[in-house]
Amino acid sequence: MDTALAQLVRALAATGAAAILVSVREAQGSTPRDAGTMMLVTTEAIHGTIGGGRLEWTAIARAREMIAAGELHALMSLPLGPALDQCCGGHVLLSLDRVDAALADKVEAAEREEAAGWPTVLLFGAGHVGAALAQALRPLPLVLHWFDERAEAAEGAVAGDLEGAIAAAPPGSAVLVMTHDHPLDFRLTALALARGDLAYVGMIGSATKRARLIRHLGHEGYNPALADRLTCPIGGRNVRDKRPAVIAALVAAELLAVLSP
């Protein structure tokens, strides 16, 4: 669920503005989106998506009819092939509901339930790549904690206890290390690797930096074989582009491949 959508539902409910929440109640066969997907429709705007195409535009038109007529609830049962000539050919049941405070409570509860199952990502570093990566990760179904020990770190990053954050991360979390200081990178990466129960440990850098990390592990009493679980360089090797936004996109895709159920 789009967390911004839940906030908007609450805001519209508070003002009493006319809006319809379109929810995919059931999705059978091949469908553009899964059950639980939501889209908010007002007379002037659309927030979120239930998959686009004729399915979405049919739902938007029905929602705006409801706003004009003052309707509170409707269901739409749509076989995508016969009714809408969409190639995916599945079947969806849509629920269309007028936004009010009770509906806002339900949407927020659904958001909390969904987010409870999201994997945790710890991002260390608020430089150019760190800031680009934080921006790329925020809309994704992940719980992001972003750290930087510098006072001038980017807005949204916190100083905090960096080493303590690694120790407290839930099993199956991901750790990405890209601070302004290589010794700090090595220290944080070693701590993350030593846990042994994280789904992903990545450190920005080259093959040379990876080799230095392996030496660091030995000097600090760690088993250098821990580096076998390290991703460095991050973002794969197929696209050689050092622009922060490109690196961020590649790393976000890499994380989703590892962390998605």
Image (tube, helix red, strand yellow):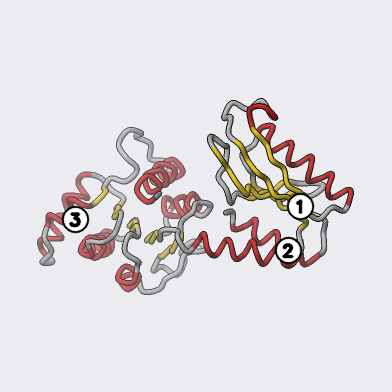
Q: Which of 126 and 12 is in front in this view?
A: 12
Q: Contact (CB < 8 A) between labels 2 and 1?
A: no
- How would you rate the neighbour count of disc 3 (Cα within 10 Å): few for under 14, some for 14-19, many for 20 or more? many
| Front tag of 3 and 1 | 1
Going by the numbered disc 1, the residue's amino acid type is: Ile
Distance, label 2 to label 1, CA atoms, is: 13 Å
Circle count: 3
- How would you rate the neighbour count of disc 2 (Cα within 10 Å): few for under 14, some for 14-19, many for 20 or more? some
Q: Residue furthest right?
A: 69
Going by the numbered disc 2, the residue's amino acid type is: Ala
Q: Name the residue under label 3.
A: 213
- Of the residues under marks 3 and 1, which one precedes in the sequence? 1
Q: Name the residue under label 1.
A: 20
As drawn, the label of residue 40 is none
| Front tag of 2 and 1 | 1
Residue located 27% across and 58% down the image? 182
Q: Nearer the viewer, residue 98 or 169?
A: 98
Residue 197, image x and y in percent?
26, 61
Going by the numbered disc 3, the residue's amino acid type is: Leu
Q: Mark 2 points at which residue?
A: 11
